[in-house]
Amino acid sequence: MSRVLVTGAAGFLGSHLCDALLARGEEVIGVDNFSTGRPENLAVARAHRAFVLLEQDVCNPLAVSGELDAVCHLASPASPADYLRLPLETLRAGSRGTETAIALAAEHGARFVLASTSEVYGNPLVHPQPETYWGNVNPIGPRSVYDEAKRFAEALTAAYARTGCLNAGIARIFNTYGPRLRPGDGRVVSNFVAQALAGEPLTVYGEGTQTRSFCYVEDLVDGLVRMIDAEVLGPVNLGNAVEVTVLELAQCVLELTGSTSRIVHRPLPADDPTRRRPDVARASELLGWKASVSLREGLARTIQWWARATATAQ
Ligand code: NAD
Ligand code: UDP
């Protein structure tokens, strides 16, 4: 592998993926329209001579001259607050944007990796979720702009792969957190850490008994890189198999920050999945991958980064 294009490069995951690829000697072309990403996420990448950024919408045709070995398609709003604010843009990034990225990969004979999501399982009726589970998604609910866009993106990827013209892989990413989460992006770790450090109440939606399985970004990016290198279509779940309730997460953030913030309850958003945990057997079998950073360790690193980033910004 020598030259990789990453869409969504200025985002939380995309920027870490660019850094990891540059660190192992790849040339990286980043694509981003900065709709939810931030220029500062690319500070490390931009310091490399092997990095270039194309500032453009992934829905417009991508023209890249020279060889290309892989295309990783991460461009899409990902936080529920973002995709509810950008519903049509989210549907386009998953549909037109995916087709544009696939066309580029096919033109160059490059491997294509789709960043899909555990949201394709919707509010799952099977627990934990294996890749063979087809999901339980409300096709016209508010979250459908994201869920159905990703389901379409998976269908498109699988259809191209079936033609034999595309070497493709589908990664179903479960909730991931870590440095470079955008303060105010509305995701639960961003909200709780920001609230705890500011001494504001932690907003638990509903009773806080709903569960998620949180993966540290370093682990996740390692899984994505293995997916680039592998020859498998998958789909493959990438996530940490340790499941916690939202209330347990809030308590852990309070403990690690030493914050005296209260916990307050707010209404549960529509169609919020009640529980989510990846079955990670396939990731282990096909990629030799398993998350290794514990929630406490990952949160401690995230909180440390967050406190430093906030102090520098002031
Ligand atoms: P993010 O919002 O931080 O990053 C997304 C990036 O894509 C941003 O830089 C944004 O500006 C860019 N983008 C959006 N639409 C674009 C467009 N039309 N053209 C060009 N750039 C565009 O989100 P993230 O957490 O880094 O997620 C990255 C990918 O991983 C997404 O596809 C998301 O669905 C997937 N994913 C993430 C998680 C997670 O927990 N972080 C979980 C499941 C799936
Ligand atoms: N959540 C919460 N408080 C917040 C933000 C989110 O209780 O301030 C809950 C949300 O309702 C969901 C879980 O935390 O049950 C994870 O939410 P997030 O938006 O991070 O990701 P999701 O898994 O819903 O895509």
Image: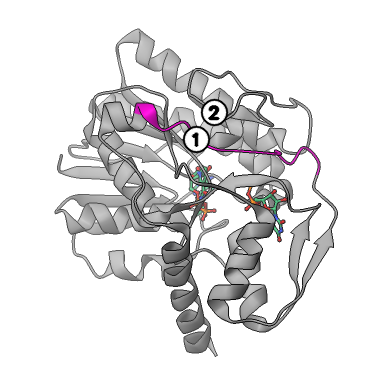
In the picture, measured across the screen, residue 195 lies left or right of residue 16, that is right
Identify the element where label 2 is drawn: loop
Q: Which residue is mark 1?
A: 278
Q: Earlier in the sequence, mark 1 or mark 2?
A: 2
Q: Which residue is mark 2?
A: 129
| Residue 76 in sight | yes
Image quadrant containing the N terminus: top left
Q: In the depicted view, which residue is nearer to us: 78 or 53?
A: 78
- The x and y percentages for residue 126 are 62, 24
Provide the major secondary structure of the magenta segment: loop
Residue at disc 2, CB closer than 8 Å to ligand 2:
no
Res. 232 image quadrant: top left
Image quadrant containing the C terminus: bottom right
**What kind of residue is marked 2?**
Gln
Q: Residue at x 38, y 48 (%)?
A: 220
Q: Which residues are magenta?
A: 270-282
Q: How many marks?
A: 2
Q: In the depicted view, which residue is nearer to us: 7 or 300?
A: 300
Res. 195 image quadrant: bottom right
- The x and y percentages for residue 238 are 42, 38
Please tell me whether residue 5 belongs to the stretch shown in magenta.
no
Marks 1/2 in contact by CB < 8 Å: the verdict is: yes
Please tell me whether residue 280 belongs to the stretch shown in magenta.
yes
Q: Residue at x 37, y 65 (%)?
A: 42
Distance from Cα at disc 1 to Cα at disc 2: 5 Å
Identify the element where label 1 is drawn: loop
Q: Give the class, few, some or many, for how many residues have Cα within 10 Å of label 1's Cα (few <14, many ≥20).
A: many
| Residue 11 in sight | no
Q: Residue at x 55, y 19 (%)?
A: 133
**Relative vertical location of residue 265 with respect to residue 196 in this rendering, above or below:** above
- The x and y percentages for residue 245 are 65, 51
**Colour logic:** one colour
